[in-house]
Image (cartoon, rainbow, N blue to C red):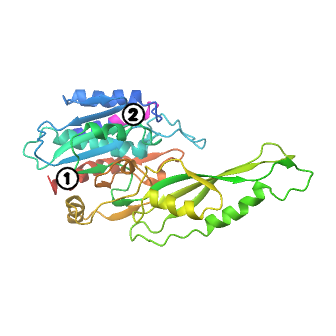
């Protein structure tokens, strides 16, 4: 186990040094391939997704999916470190993707490797190192699920401080178009879309959704972008707002769209309705298993590949979500060292 943990950390260090932005993860996929080859594990690669089945896979048994992603966002301008240098200082491993979600990824790969040849498991295991998570791309997890046997539930690896997220908010991004009349700025214009947008902003600010979740709270709406005009002396003909809506498990994304469509005082269009919220019953064996070994449960406000699957799942992993997408991203080495046996302890409650 000690050697496996050491090798998992080495894998993460290597992955950090490779550019693996969404849609450009070929090098990190190659490195993950090499891990499986080194342990004589048969695997399949589709685009930049790598997946494998435990050696004693039995179609008569239920199946658990272990999943995390190896793509990253692009580094922000606040970095003072080299984002592609896997530097260790004071017990912290720095580098782009170290926390989101490299720590969880290599921990789950190590767990699968440890269990790969085990006989008489109650469950089958599938490991999936997926691509395009950060961009919700079409060639990520959604492209692999149809190729797999029926999955009974999944463990999604994301930085949660090894707390168990048993619910996760969904996401809808809306584009709102506010119409007006274009004119020269020197003339009177009572149909300026920028002024008209005040009513739209007030409508958004006063939105209320009745159903409140004990785990995820209320549906949250946030204006994240506003754009209009390109010349100082011209009143534009329209203004565009971007509205970010985080949906609790009490609603489907389609239901939220229908509610907003009826009341919206302007044109409103969703970019996608596919990123729904998720929830797993507290009576599910994996949730009960977490309670047995005292893993804290919570509802997560952040989106993951849980939104792309239609079977029960939990989200759990080393690292802290508040470090994700930040400058000089890092994960504590001890978080990985503790996560691998913790994952195994959790699985051992059911397998």
- Name the outermost residue toward the front: 262
- On screen, residue 281 versus residue 22, left or right, reads left
Residue 268 appears in the picture as rendered: yes
Position of the N terminus by quadrant = top left
Residue 17 sits in quarter: top left
Could you tell me residue 52's position as x and y percent?
Answer: 23, 35
Q: Which residue is mark 2?
A: 15
Residue 1 appears in the picture as rendered: no
Could you tell me residue 23's position as x and y percent?
Answer: 46, 32
Tell me the element at label 2.
helix
Q: Is residue 5 above or below residue 172?
A: above
Callout 1: 10 Å neighbours few (<14), some, many (20+)? some
Q: Is residue 269 above or below residue 56?
A: below
Residue 14 sits in quarter: top left
Q: Residue at x 31, y 41 (%)?
A: 106
Could you tell me residue 312's position as x and y percent?
Answer: 28, 55
Q: Nearer the viewer, mark 2 or mark 1?
A: 1
Q: CA distance from mark 2 to mark 1?
A: 26 Å
Could you tell me residue 230's position as x and y percent?
Answer: 78, 42
């Amino acid at each position: 186990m000690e050697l496996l943990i050491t090798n998992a950390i080495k894998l993460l260090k290597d992955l950090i040094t490779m550019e693996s932005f969404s849609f450009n993860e070929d090098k990190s996929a190659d490195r993950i391939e090499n891990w499986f080859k080194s342990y004589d594990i048969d695997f399949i690669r589709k685009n930049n997704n790598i997946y494998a089945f435990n050696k004693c896979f039995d179609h008569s048994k239920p199946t658990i999916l272990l999943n995390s992603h190896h793509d990253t966002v692009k580094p922000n301008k606040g970095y003072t470190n080299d984002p592609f240098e896997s530097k260790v200082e004071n017990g912290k491993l720095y580098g782009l993707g170290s926390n989101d979600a490299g720590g969880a990824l290599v921990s789950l790969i190590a767990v699968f490797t440890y269990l790969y040849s085990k006989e008489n498991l109650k469950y089958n295991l599938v490991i999936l190192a997926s691509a395009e998570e950060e961009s919700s791309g079409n060639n990520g997890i959604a492209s692999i699920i149809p190729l797999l046997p029926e999955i009974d539930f999944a463990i999604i690896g994301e930085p949660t401080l090894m707390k168990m997220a048993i619910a996760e908010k969904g996401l809808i991004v809306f584009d709102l178009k506010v119409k007006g009349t274009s004119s020269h700025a020197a003339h009177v214009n009572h149909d300026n879309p920028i002024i008209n947008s005040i009513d739209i902003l007030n409508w958004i600010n006063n939105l209320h959704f009745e159903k409140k979740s004990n785990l995820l709270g209320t549906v949250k709406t946030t204006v994240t972008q506003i754009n209009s005009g390109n010349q100082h002396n011209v009143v534009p003909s329209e203004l565009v707002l971007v509205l970010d809506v985080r949906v609790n498990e009490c609603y489907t994304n389609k239901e939220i769209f229908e509610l907003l469509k009826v009341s919206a005082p302007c044109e409103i269009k969703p970019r996608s309705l596919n990123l729904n919220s998720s929830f797993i019953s507290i009576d599910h064996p994996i949730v009960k298993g977490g309670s047995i070994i005292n893993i804290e449960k919570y509802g997560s406000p952040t989106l993951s590949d849980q939104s792309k699957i239609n079977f029960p799942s939990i989200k759990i992993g080393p690292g802290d979500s508040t470090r994700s997408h930040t400058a000089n991203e890092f994960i504590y080495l001890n978080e990985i060292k503790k996560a691998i046996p913790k994952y195994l302890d959790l699985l051992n409650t059911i397998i």
